[in-house]
Image (tube, rainbow, N blue to C red):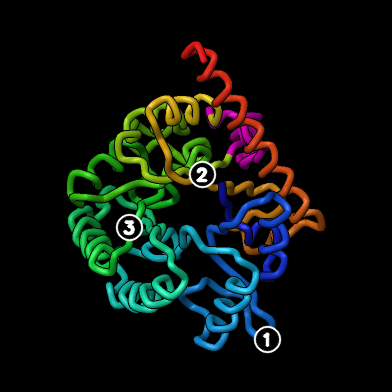
Amino acid sequence: MTGFADEAGDAIEVQIRATKALGWENIESRTVKVEGFDRGNIHDIPDAAFDRLAGILSDAGVKINCFGSAIANWGKKIDDPFDVTLPEIRRAIPRMKRLGTKLVRIMSYAVRDSDDQMEQERFRRVREIRKMFDDAGMTAVHENCMNYGGMGWPFTLRLLENVPGMKLVFDTGNPLFSDDRSKPKPCPKQSSWEFYEHVRDHVAYIHIKDGRWNAAAKTSDYSFPGAGDGDVRRIMKDMLRRGYDGGVSIEPHMGAVFHDPAAGHSLDAEGIYVEYGRRMVKLLDGVRAELKAEQGG
């Protein structure tokens, strides 16, 4: 088990404290605040900040199992020069090598407000991104978020067809809050189970998020795992039944909504993060017990 510990707090010391409170040894790192430096993504912070970060993690005995990079994410446009992406990759690779990190989360650029999603250019760029990490001994995993692949499972399958060897990180909650662009307008929201069912053979990593779409308020109401419409229990049971042994990473969005810069952290963000982790461990224990009973164990 691991998680986006920046949802517990900005400071690396808080992230480590929350991780250890759960008895975990890994963080899926995204953004971090090192004393004396501004908060930033690991591939963007200055070399001096990264050096200090690496030392703090080593002293604490905590590792970065997966890097939640901003490479080709929802903030990057496909019609921007590729030169925006390449420096992020070139900074990320040596830093992840130093940390011993093998998985890097990537995306497939922001959705365009147009019928033309510039698919071939997306495929070309993601192929290059995947190859650069593969050549460095790392695995790039694509997330179904606010990007081309997140527009619906048919788009993720199209991406997989055009980017040989691509693996996925499947986020259980993102479909709930995303329009299904594969269906006629007005596009309905996606189904987590339907999306998962079509892509599960390619999943190498799992993000746990849950909640419900509040249609009246047009907002996302996030919840503890298993309490929303994300089919978390059903998906994890199916994954484990199929022999899944990859990572499971929590991304609560309850104490801090990362995609909303104005939201910041609640006063109890660290406590919510730790409670979320405990509930997810309990859910997985229950699922494993169910599977054992079904198998006559």
Mark 1 belongs to which amino acid? Gly
Q: Which mark is residue 139?
A: 3
Give the residue number, with chain letter if any, for mark 2: 248
Q: Is residue 259 visible?
A: no
Mark 2 / mark 3, whichever is N-terminal: 3
Say which residue appears at 58% left-offset and 73% top-offset.
Answer: 58
Q: Is residue 86 visible?
A: yes
Mark 2 / mark 1, whichever is N-terminal: 1
Alpha carbon separation for disc pair 3 and 1: 32 Å
**Viewer-proximal residue among 12 and 84:** 12
Say which residue appears at 36% left-offset and 41% top-offset.
Answer: 203
Q: Look at the image and say whether residue 228 sits in the magenta stretch.
A: yes
Mark 2 belongs to which amino acid? Val
Instruction: Please report contact status of discs 2 and 3: CB closer than 8 Å, yes or no.
Output: no
Q: Tell me residue 38's x, y (percent).
A: 63, 81
Depth-wise, is mark 3 or mark 1 nearer the camera?
3
Circle 2 packing at 10 Å, graded few (<14), some (14-19), many (20+), is many
Q: Which mark is residue 276?
A: none
Q: Secondary structure at mark 2?
A: strand
Depth-wise, is mark 2 or mark 1 nearer the camera?
2
**Viewer-proximal residue among 196 and 175:** 196
Query: Where, by quadrant of the figure, is residue 62 drawn?
Result: bottom right
Q: Secondary structure at mark 1?
A: loop
289 versus 215 height, above or below? above
Taking the image as shown, residue 138 lies to the left or right of residue 38, namely left
Give the residue number, with chain letter if any, for mark 1: 36
Q: Which region shows up in magenta? A: 210-231
Q: How many marks?
A: 3
**Viewer-proximal residue among 58 and 261:** 58
The majority secondary structure of the magenta stretch comes to: loop
